[in-house]
Amino acid sequence: QVQLVESGGELVQAGGSLRLSCAASGRTLSNYYMGWFRHPPGKEREFVAAISGRGRFTSYADSVKGRSTISRDNVKNTVYLQISSLTPEDTAAYYCAAATTGPVHVESSYTYWGQGTQVTVSS
């Protein structure tokens, strides 16, 4: 079992930035791909970014590419998502998830999920 707890979500103004954190416990995080997904209001949950077990491989959705960075610290068992140039379209509940295999942009690849952290971007 892997327990995931997200934090860092808050209300921010458009143009601002945030760093979300996902703290893991239960198993060695380096064994897992880690992904971030988001669930905007009125829409389906969507892939945001993913990172391989040792951080050598990353993948981003087009909607955040170039303004976001996913990273991980396997010593702290924590994964981060930094997003800048936020717009109201980034408003969503953000979830981190752990997978043992890909494809990393597909929800069904992920076995463990956190409870989410809310990001609200005001215009």
Image: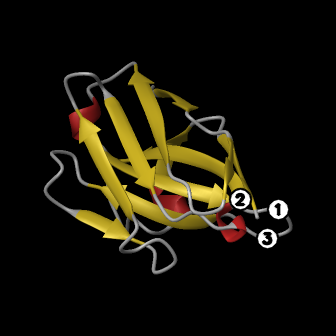
Mark 1 closeness class: few <14, some 14–19, many ≥20 residues within 10 Å: few
Point out which mark residue 60 bears.
Answer: none
- Residue at image position (57%, 63%) is 15
Given this view, does label 2 or label 3 mark the residue nearer the observer?
A: 2
> In the rendered view, would you say 20 is above or below 35?
above
Is the residue under label 1 in contact with that under label 2 (CB below 8 Å)? yes
Which residue is denoted by mark 1 in the rendering?
Answer: 41
Which residue is denoted by mark 2 in the rendering?
Answer: 91
* Residue 92: percent from left, percent from top: 71, 56
Relative side of 25 to 107, left or right = left
> Which residue is at the front of the view, 105 or 13?
13
Asked which secondary structure carries label 2, the reply is loop
- Residue at image position (56%, 34%) is 8
Asked which secondary structure carries label 1, the reply is loop
Which residue is denoted by mark 3 in the rendering?
Answer: 43
Of the 4 image quadrants, the one containing the N terminus is top left
Residue that extends furthest to the top in the rendered view of this protein: 26
Question: Three-letter amino acid code at disc 3?
Answer: Lys
Give the spatial CA distance, label 2 vs label 3. 11 Å
* Residue 110: percent from left, percent from top: 48, 52
Is the residue under label 3 in contact with that under label 2 (CB below 8 Å)? no
Is the residue under label 1 in contact with that under label 3 (CB below 8 Å)? yes
* Residue 86: percent from left, percent from top: 58, 63
Question: Three-letter amino acid code at disc 2?
Answer: Thr
* Quadrant assignment, res 90: bottom right
Of the 4 image quadrants, the one containing the C terminus is bottom right
Give the spatial CA distance, label 2 vs label 1. 8 Å
> Which residue is at the front of the view, 115 or 14?
14
Relative side of 71 to 87, left or right = left
